[in-house]
Structure formats: structure tokens, C-alpha cells
Amino acid sequence: MNTLILHIDKETDPELEAAAAILRNGGTVIFPTETVYGLGANALSADAAQKIYEAKGRPSDNPLIVHIARWDQIHEIAAEVPACAERLAACFWPGPLTLILKKRAVVPNQVTGGLDTVAVRLPAHPIARRLIALAGVPVAAPSANLSGKPSPTRSAHVVQDMDGRVDCIICGGDAIGGVESTVLDLTVMPPMILRPGGISLEQLEAEVPGVGVDPALETAHNRAPRAPGMKYAHYAPDAPMTVFEGDERACAAALETAVHEALAAGRRVAVLAFEDYREAYTEAGAIFFSLGSKSRPEEAANRLFQSLRACNDACVDQILAQAVSEKGIGLAVMNRMRKAAGGNVVRV
Ligand code: TXA
Ligand code: MG
């Protein structure tokens, strides 16, 4: 397949119309959002949605998020829009929050993985919103990575994974958020977080007292998660990865010991840790990728996926990562980090 690559840095760029026409005609377009890049197709077409699964190599029981450009489009795809949805949208849309609602019949089963619910999000990125508005249809879009790989936050990652597999790629700069949207199920009472993301538990608690968290998120492996996508191996870098959790100093020391062991065994080792530790681990002989400042967890969110991809590019044999606090966006970061490590966590 010949992929049209467009470099667009403003939503007013007339070239966006070409991409919108591809969506309208049932094709696939990768576009930037404020969380990660998305791989979009017309959400009202079963055939178009099918192309998404093929391009990603994604299991077809894993439902897609439907992106809209304006609030009132929600009524096109959701059968019931509770007052709570309206309130949350007023607070957090446009932005990284996805709401699970009862679906309308027009939304094909291919989009919802056969469920009677649909995931809806109104993204904040101006290019994403303009593209969806121009397309004139809601746009189903998972993260634009090959299934199982780290989600793409830079256009170069998308081109690497998807050139030749989709009709069009819009290169539109870096995705700032770095972790995907929060998935919130509004079909249950109290509403439940199925995937932590860009809008934090604390932010939601302020609007939805008693909001729950899917127990499967806490017990990592022994329960079936309610968001079908959460059961698959995810975000995996090429090299085995270990996460060190617990008291920060004790973790740092345990991590350093692990670095020495890996190097002694002749392995190329990468460390993902806060900027404060750069010197210590670099001097120890590791390749260092910074999670930013400890006091700014949004930096860890922004850098996690690109660091995992950088580990692949650096052909490391082993990855050791320092856990971050689970406050705020940190909950989403730790969810991704543990999954990337395949649950390989050392509690110090
Ligand atoms: O930030 C994001 O959400 C990005 C950008 C592109 O918008 N998209 C994204 O999509 O992360 P994806 O497909 O990688 O993840 C969607 C998640 C999956 O875990 C999926 O199982 C869950 O949402 N999901 C979708 N529809 C659902 C539904 N009806 N019920 C429960 N979970 C659903
Ligand atoms: Mg994804």
C-alpha cells in the first residue's frame, strides 16, 4: 500500500482536507492527538474499521475508541447520554477522557468488539479535531502502534511502524501527554475507571464522588479486566524489563546492584529513572533514559513510551526502571510501566 505522508503543523493547513477525504471514503489515516498518535477510520463503517485491525495486527475483540469533533456528535453514536456524561464532558472535554456508553445500532460490531457499549472521546489536539470535523464522520482510532508495541508519541515512530500499512500519515509534531486517555465506564454505578490515563483518578473523584477503579488494575494478573484491551500484552519493548518499586533510595540502590550484575554478565543495560539519577547510572555504565523531574510526573508520562522505543533503537539486552509515585498521572504511568515489563516487578 502506498502511504501518503503529510507534514502538517497547523489545523488550518488546507492539506488536511485530503486526509479527511480519505477517511470519508473508507480509508485509514494516522493523526496526532494530545495523548498519543491514533490510527483512524470511519467509525460508522464496518469495512473501514476492519482495516484498522489489519493495519495494527490487533485482535478484533479489542474495541476501538470513537473520536468526535463536537459534543453533540455523541448523540449520533450513544443511545443513552447520562447527565454525568454531560458534566464530565463540560469539565474534561476536549481532552484525554474516554467515556463508555450504551451504543446506538449504527455503530458496527467491528468497532465495539461485539459489545453493546461504545467508547467516545473528544480529543483536544487541534489537528485531530479539525480532521474529524472535516471528515464529517466519527473516527474510530486506537493508538497507532503495531499491536503490543509501545504507543507512538512522535511522528517518526508512526512512520517506522505503519508506513505502507495505512493510506495516510499526518506528521504533526510530538504528542505531549504521552499516555493514553482515561477510560471511564458510565454504564455501571458508580462509574468505573477501566484504564487510568491523562485525566487522573483525583480529578475524576472531584466530579464523580465514589468513582471506582477496575479491580483488575490493582491485581495485575489474576482477574479478567473489563476493558478488553487491558488483557493483552502491551507496550512491550524488545528487551526484558524489570520495574523496581518501593522506597526510593532502597530502589535506587537495588537498581544499581542490578546494573552491575547485568554489566558483569556482558549485557547492554538501559535504565529509566528520574533525572536526579542520571550521573549515578551513567557512571555505573548503563545507558540512561530520563523520566524527568520527580516533582513533575507529567514528564514521566511524556517520556515513557519514547524511552521504551529508544531502548529498542539502542539494542539493549535488558531494561531496569525506577517506579514513580501513583499520585495523579503517575497511576497511568505505573500501569503502562508494569505492563511493558510484563508484570516483572521487584518490590524493594
Ligand atoms: O488516548 C487514547 O485513548 C488513544 C488516542 C488515539 O485517542 N487511543 C487509544 O486507543 O489508546 P486504544 O484502542 O489503544 O485503547 C482503547 C482502550 C482499550 O483498552 C479498549 O479495550 C478500551 O479502550 N475500550 C474501547 N471500547 C470499550 C468498550 N466499549 N468497553 C470497554 N472498554 C473499551
Ligand atoms: Mg493502544
Image (tube, rainbow, N blue to C red):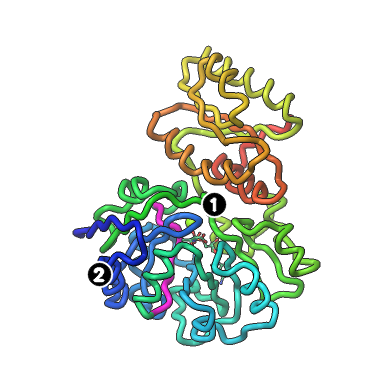
Front-most of residues 236 and 321: 321
**Residue occupying the point 40% across, 29% down:** 314
In the image, is residue 4 above or below residue 344? below
**Residue occupying the point 69% across, 51% down:** 328
Disc 2 marks which amino acid?
Answer: Ala
Tell me if the residue at label 2 has its CB under 8 Å from ligand 1.
no
Q: Which mark is residue 18?
A: 2
In the image, is residue 110 above or below residue 270? below
Percent position of residue 149, x then y: 44, 47
Q: Is residue 8 left or right of 320 when viewed as pictured? A: left
Counting residues from the start of the chain, the first of labels 2 and 1 encountered is: 2
Q: Is residue 155 left or right of 344 when viewed as pictured? A: left
Disc 1 marks which amino acid?
Answer: Val
Q: Nearer the viewer, mark 2 or mark 1?
A: 2
Percent position of residue 43, x then y: 41, 76
**Residue occupying the point 46% across, 62% down:** 125
Can residue 329 be seen? yes
Q: Which mark is residue 344?
A: none
The magenta span reads 137-145
Q: Quadrant of residue 200?
A: bottom right
**Residue occupying the point 57% across, 42% down:** 299
From the image, tell me which residue sits under label 1. 179
Front-most of residues 136 and 100: 136
Q: Is residue 3 left or right of 204 when viewed as pictured? A: left
- Neighbours of disc 2 within 10 Å: few (<14), some (14-19), many (20+): some
Which image quarter holds the C terminus?
A: top right
Which image quarter holds the N terminus?
A: bottom left
Q: In what element is the residue under mark 1?
A: loop
- Neighbours of disc 1 within 10 Å: few (<14), some (14-19), many (20+): many
Q: How far is mark 2 from mark 1, CA to CA?
A: 28 Å
Percent position of residue 234, x then y: 51, 49
